[in-house]
Structure formats: structure tokens, C-alpha cells
Image (tube, grey):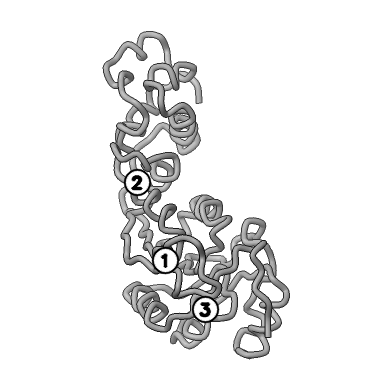
């Protein structure tokens, strides 16, 4: 047996219909290498290990869960990376897909780490807190559109798949959950550099109640700041707007 640990954000999926829907979404894609983040008690894992011609690995920090998984699913021997996901090295030499019921307390950080590996990660299917999933998928002009939306969307197309209510988990979280799919875009936005774009977005949303002119004045010349686009607030700018502005920054 195993214990549930709130400190690790553990809410284990128990509803078989939801599990099947997630596996079905995964099977629509083509991949050879697959990484599961946070397998927990193996709700998804017991299906994933039977996928044909797939090289599977999982990342699980909790030593107790690793022992449970290896005992109940012998095929996992040598396939579990017992480490904090945020500290691991790239798990495969080539391209790999990612799936998981991500620990809610670090789900955004998980995505940002995967973003650093975007050239090797063609798609991600993940369970998130509904509020986080909505933020990732949000469009400009929406009050929840922000740093997470604008940093991920240049590289990945977001498909909001379905909601998952609390009673589908053990223990039930206090929030609604949602499953989304992130598919890497073939044509990435042209920007001055990933570093410049990231700095612009984070600076703009750091003071999102202010006009862009006041929020990012340190990054542009006084002449450029006279333009009408700087009358807007950060949440009104599309990722295309941010990318275009990145070329005009005098400070990266």
C-alpha cells in the first residue's frame, strides 16, 4: 500500500472513463519515446506500459510510490526516474512525448521546463487545475490571459480537451481539473530572440494594470514609445504583437 502526500500535490485519478479518454487522446498521436510525469499509483501507467513499440519512462519523486509501482508493475523496473522533475536531465536522446496528471503545485513550472526542451517535445497531454488550463489556453483581451499564455502559445497550439470534477480523484481536490493537449507549432513566431520575447512579456505583465508605455518603458526608446500600441495594456496584445515589438527593443 501507499500513503497520499499533500505536500507533493498528490491527487490520484481513479475514474476509469477519464483514464480511457486521456489514453484515447494520446493514441491519436505518433511517437516512439514517452515520458510520464507523476505516475503516482499507476492509473495511467498501467495502460502506458502496454503501448506497442513505445519506449516508456516515468518520473516520480516519491520513493514509496516508486516501490509500489515496481512491485505491482514489474515492467517498470529500470524505467522510473526517482527525482524531482524540475531537476532532471533530458530523459531521452531524441524526440519524446509527455503525458501526466501533473502535480498541481508545480504544474506551471513543469511546462516552463518542457518549453526549454520544445525542439524535442512534439506534444504534451496533461491534467491541470482548471484555472491553470484556462490560463494556458486564454486569448488576448481575457482577464486570465497572461505570462503563461503568452510564453507558451508561440510554440504550442493549445487544445482544451475536457473538464474533470473533483470526485474523479482520490483524495478529491478542492478545485475543478482539466485535460489539455499542447501540440508544437510547425511555424514558430518570428521574434528578435526567445530571450528578448520572454523579457518583454514578463515585464509587460508585471505591471498589467498600467499601459504598456509605463510598464515597458525601460525596454524601448522614447521615440518608439510614442506609438499608439503603447496605449494598450499587456492583456490586449496578442503573441504576434509581442513578437513584432521584440525587434524594436533597445534592451534585451
Q: CA distance from mark 2 to mark 3?
A: 28 Å
Which of the two discs, 1 and 2, labels the residue nearer the N terminus?
A: 1
Circle 2: is it few (<14), some (14-19), or many (20+) Cα within 10 Å? few
Quadrant of residue 87 in the image? Answer: bottom right
Circle 3: is it few (<14), some (14-19), or many (20+) Cα within 10 Å? some
Towards the viewer: 124 or 166 = 166
Q: Which residue is mark 2?
A: 188
Circle 1: is it few (<14), some (14-19), or many (20+) Cα within 10 Å? many
| Residue at horizontal 29 percent and vertical 21 percent from the top | 229
Q: Secondary structure at mark 2?
A: loop
Instruction: Work out whether 219 lies above or below 205.
Output: above
Q: In the image, is 195 to the left or to the right of 80?
A: left
Which of the two discs, 2 and 3, labels the residue nearer the N terminus?
A: 3
| Residue at horizontal 67 percent and vertical 62 percent from the top | 7
Which of the two discs, 3 and 1, labels the residue nearer the N terminus?
A: 3
Q: Secondary structure at mark 1?
A: strand
Q: Which residue is mark 3?
A: 55
Query: Which of label 1 and label 2 is nearer to you?
Result: 1
Q: Which residue is mark 1?
A: 125
Q: In the image, is 115 to the left or to the right of 141?
A: right
Quadrant in which the N terminus is drawn = bottom right
Amino acid at each position: 500500500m501507499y500513503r497520499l502526500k499533500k505536500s507533493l500535490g498528490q491527487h490520484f485519478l481513479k475514474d476509469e472513463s477519464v483514464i480511457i479518454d486521456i489514453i484515447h487522446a494520446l493514441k491519436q498521436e505518433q511517437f516512439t519515446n514517452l515520458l510520464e510525469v507523476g505516475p503516482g499509483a499507476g492509473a495511467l501507467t498501467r495502460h502506458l506500459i502496454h503501448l506497442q513499440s513505445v519506449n516508456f519512462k516515468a518520473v516520480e519523486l516519491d520513493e514509496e510510490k516508486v516501490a509500489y509501482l515496481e512491485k505491482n508493475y514489474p515492467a517498470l523496473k529500470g524505467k522510473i526516474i526517482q527525482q524531482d522533475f524540475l531537476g532532471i536531465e533530458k530523459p531521452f536522446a531524441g524526440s519524446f512525448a509527455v503525458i501526466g496528471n501533473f502535480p498541481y503545485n508545480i504544474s506551471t513550472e513543469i511546462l516552463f521546463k518542457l518549453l526549454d526542451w520544445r525542439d524535442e517535445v512534439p506534444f504534451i497531454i496533461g491534467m491541470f487545475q482548471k484555472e491553470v488550463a484556462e490560463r494556458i489556453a486564454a486569448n488576448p483581451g481575457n482577464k486570465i490571459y497572461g505570462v503563461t499564455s503568452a510564453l507558451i502559445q508561440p510554440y504550442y497550439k493549445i487544445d482544451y480537451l475536457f473538464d474533470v470534477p473533483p470526485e474523479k480523484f482520490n483524495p478529491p481536490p478542492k478545485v475543478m481539473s482539466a485535460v489539455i493537449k499542447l501540440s508544437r507549432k510547425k511555424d514558430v513566431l518570428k521574434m528578435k530572440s526567445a530571450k528578448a520575447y520572454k523579457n518583454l512579456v514578463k515585464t509587460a505583465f508585471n505591471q498589467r494594470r498600467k499601459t504598456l508605455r509605463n510598464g515597458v518603458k525601460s525596454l524601448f526608446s522614447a521615440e518608439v514609445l510614442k506609438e499608439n500600441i503603447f496605449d494598450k495594456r499587456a492583456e490586449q496584445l496578442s503573441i504576434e504583437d509581442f513578437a513584432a515589438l521584440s525587434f524594436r527593443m533597445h534592451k534585451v
